[in-house]
Amino acid sequence: MGIIYKAGEDPIIQIANEFTVVQLAYIRTGNGERLVVTSPKLGFETQLDPLQLECLTWQPSATFSRLLETPYGPGSEMRAKPLSILMRKE
């Protein structure tokens, strides 16, 4: 995890592993405060208000597993195969 500082702006928190990078920032809008979650590699971004964030805490882990079945959004089925099948000589 790292923190990115830009002059005159609130810091951005960056969380990464070998698969992805996610950046978190805080903004104030006319409708209240929001957490901005950005995936810089994929170009996706969402703004979550406090109630939306709280709703995440209500979810069982199975909800997130279902979301990861199509990690690039609806209609983007993963066609991954186990390495053992890919290495099989035919």
Image (spheres, rainbow, N blue to C red):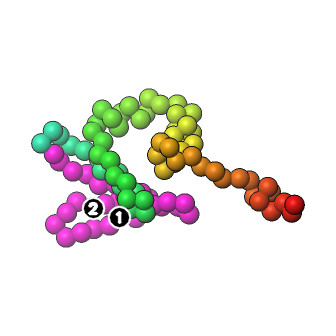
Residue that badge 1 annotates = 3
The disc placed on residue 34 is none
For numbered disc 1, what is the local secondary structure?
strand
The span shown in magenta is: 1-29
Left or right side of 79 for 22: left
Can residue 14 be seen in the rendering of this structure?
Answer: no
Give the position of the C terminus as an image quadrant: bottom right
How many residues crowd mark 1 within 10 Å: few (<14), some (14–19), many (20+)?
few
Q: Position of residue 1 (x, y in %)?
A: 44, 61
Amino acid on which disc 1 is placed: Ile
How many dots with numbers? 2
Image point (30%, 32%), residue name = 51
Q: Which is more N-terminal, label 2 or label 1? A: 1
Image point (64%, 51%), residue name = 79
| Closer to us: 82 or 18 | 82
| Closer to us: 13 or 68 | 68
Residue that badge 2 annotates = 11
| Closer to us: 58 or 86 | 86
Amino acid on which disc 2 is placed: Pro
